[in-house]
Amino acid sequence: MQLRTHPCMTHWPPVWTRISGKGNLPDDETSRLEEVHRSTVVRNACFLIIQCDKTRYIGTLQFDDDQCCEKIYDFLSDHRGQSIRDIRELDVP
């Protein structure tokens, strides 16, 4: 099942907030996943940091439960450096 349609996802895509650079909104075609972090406050959330051109953004993914969050966190961690377009189309094991 593709990440963007996985049943444990509360919402996809994340809402992106610019944290550095001068860009507007990120583009799935050119955005690359840089970092993935588990939230230490909300057990069923993780944060993604992406780069699009020379601008960085952060977005939050929320899940139905913390086990699903851990599974997706591990999955995304293995795909750092890939485009968001490619990642959203991947099948989650």
Image: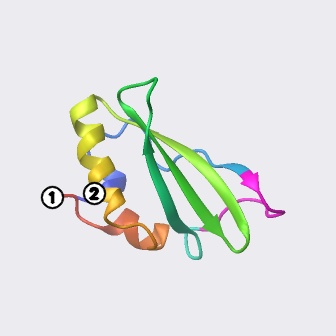
Q: Nearer the viewer, residue 43 or 40?
A: 40
Q: Residue at x 35, y 58 (%)?
A: 77
Q: Disc 1 vs disc 2: Cβ atoms closer than 8 Å?
A: yes
The amino acid sitting under disc 1 is Pro
How many marks are shown on the rendered structure?
2
Dot placed on the residue nearer the N-terminal end, 1 or 2: 2
View extreme (front): residue: 40
Helix, strand or loop at mark 1: loop
Q: Which residue is drawn at 28% across and 52% down?
A: 74
Residue 33, image x, y percentages: 50, 64
What crowding class fits label 2: few (fewer than 14 Cα within 10 Å), some (14-19), or many (20 or more)? some
Q: Residue at x 37, y 54 (%)?
A: 4
Q: In this view, does 23 lie to the left or right of 5?
A: right
> Which mark, by number, is residue 75?
2
Q: Is residue 8 visible?
A: no
Residue 36 vertical placement versus 80 (above, below)? above
Q: In this view, does 69 lie to the left or right of 10?
A: left
Q: For the residues marked 1 and 2, what is the alpha-carbon distance in whole angstroms?
A: 8 Å
Q: What stretch is highlighted in magenta?
A: 19-27
Provide the residue designation for mark 1: 93
